[in-house]
Amino acid sequence: MNPPQISIVGAGIGGLAAALALQQRGLSVRVFEQARALAPVGAGVHISPNGMHVLSELGISTDTLNAFRPGATVIREYQTSEPLFETPLGNTIEQAFGSPFLDLHRADLHQALMTQVQANDPDTVVLNKMLVSITEKSDEVTLRFTDKSQSTAQVVIGADGVHSVVRASLFDSLAAEYTGHVAYRGLIATDSLPDGLIDPVLNIWAGPGKHVVAYYLRNGELLNYVAAVEEPDWTTESWTTRADVAQLADYFVDWHTSVKTLIASTPAEACYKWALLVRPPMQNWSTGRTTLLGDAAHPMVPYMAQGAVMAIEDAWVLSHYLATESDIAIALANYGSARQGRTAAVQRAAWEQGQKTHAQTQHQSDSVASGGHFAKTQWLYGYNVCTEYPLIDPD
C-alpha cells in the first residue's frame, strides 16, 4: 500500500511521540499545533518503565532527558514526616522491569521528542494552527483552522488534550464530574532551599483530605511538588491558572516543616492550581479515518502518574497498526481494541488511588511487603508494548 498521509492535531508529548513512531515506520506525517511558538511549559512528569521502553525504542536516551532517578517512593506521616512505608525505585525497579523510573521536566521530554521529529523532517510540525472543525469523507479527512486555511489527509489523529476539538467534533460530549480535589503545583530552584530539606526520593506526605508529592528534576537542580486539597468550589480545569501561595500555605499550617518550607519558598509566579475532573472511559475512539490519542481519548486524574505514559504507549500501538494494516478503518479499530481496556483500567485506578491517599489511616494496610516490592504494580509497569507490538522494518 502507499503510505498514508497522516495529520496529527496537537504537538504535545503524545502527538510528538506518535509522529516519531510513525516516522520510524516510514509513514508521512504532519503535526498541527495551535501555539504560536513551542515555549517550555509544564513542570514535573514521571515516566515509569512501561513508558521508558517506548522512549528507548524511539531513540530517546536517558542521557538526553536531563532526568532525576529517585531512589524510592516514601509515604510519610503528614505531621512528623516519619516514613509509613517505602517502595524501592532506582536500580531495583530497573532490574525488575528492564527500564528505569525517571522524574523529568516536561519541557525536557518535549524537546527531546521535538529534536528527533525535526531531525527526520524539519517541516513536520506546523505552528499557529488552531483547529476549528473536522470533516471526514470516505477517502479523506479535512481539517479547517482559524486562519481560514485547511489541510486534507488520509488519517487524522486527535492528540489535542483533555479539551480535544477533534473529540468534540466527532463524538458526543464527554461528561465530566468534579472530584472535589484541586491540585496546586510549584517549582523551586533547589539551591534556594535549606540543604537536606527533601530526601532524594519520591516523597508523599499523606494526611486527612490532603497530600503533597515532592521530587527532584533536572539532576536535582529543581524541586517539583504537587499539593492536592479538597475544595468545594474551584472547578477550572487548566494547568495555567496562577495560584495564591498564601492561600495554599493556609491549608498546611499544621503539617511538617518540610511541607511548609516548600510552600513558603515557592515564587509567586511559579504556583498554579487546577481542578481535577473525572470522565468515564469512552467506548469508541475512532471513526473510519480519525482516531484519538492520549488525554483526548482517556483523560485521567494524575494520581497514578500515567497520563503522559499512556499517551506514549498509545503512540507506539497506533503506529504499529497504521504501518501493518492496509485498511485504515481496520487499523484504527484494532488500535482501539488494543488500548481501551488498559487505559480504562488506569483511569479507574488513578481516581481510586487519589481517594485512598486522602484517607491516611489506610496507608499501613497498603504496604507492599507481601508479594514483593512491585506486586501491585506489575500489571502497570511490567507491560511492554514494544514486545507486544514489535517494530517491523518499513523496508
Image (cartoon, rainbow, N blue to C red):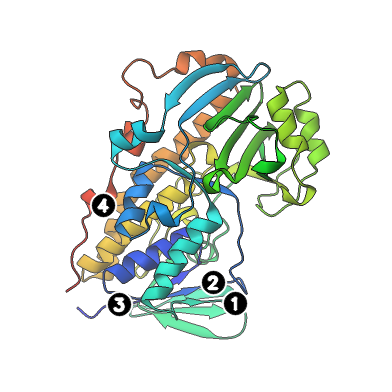
- Residue that numbered label 1 is attached to: 128
Q: Position of residue 279 (x, y in %)?
A: 53, 45
Left or right? Give the position of 216 relative to 54. Answer: right
Residue type marked 3: Pro
Q: How many marks?
A: 4
Q: Earlier in the sequence, mark 2 or mark 4?
A: 2
Helix, strand or loop under label 1: loop
Residue type marked 4: Cys
Residue 159 visible in the picture: no
Q: Residue at x 48, y 65 (%)?
A: 170
The Cα atoms of the two marked residues, 1 and 4, are separated by 33 Å
Give the label on residue 386, or none.
4
Q: Residue at x 49, y 41 (%)?
A: 305
Q: Residue at x 53, y 80 (%)?
A: 144
- Residue that numbered label 2 is attached to: 33
Q: Residues at badges 2 and 1 in contact (C-beta under 8 Å)? A: yes
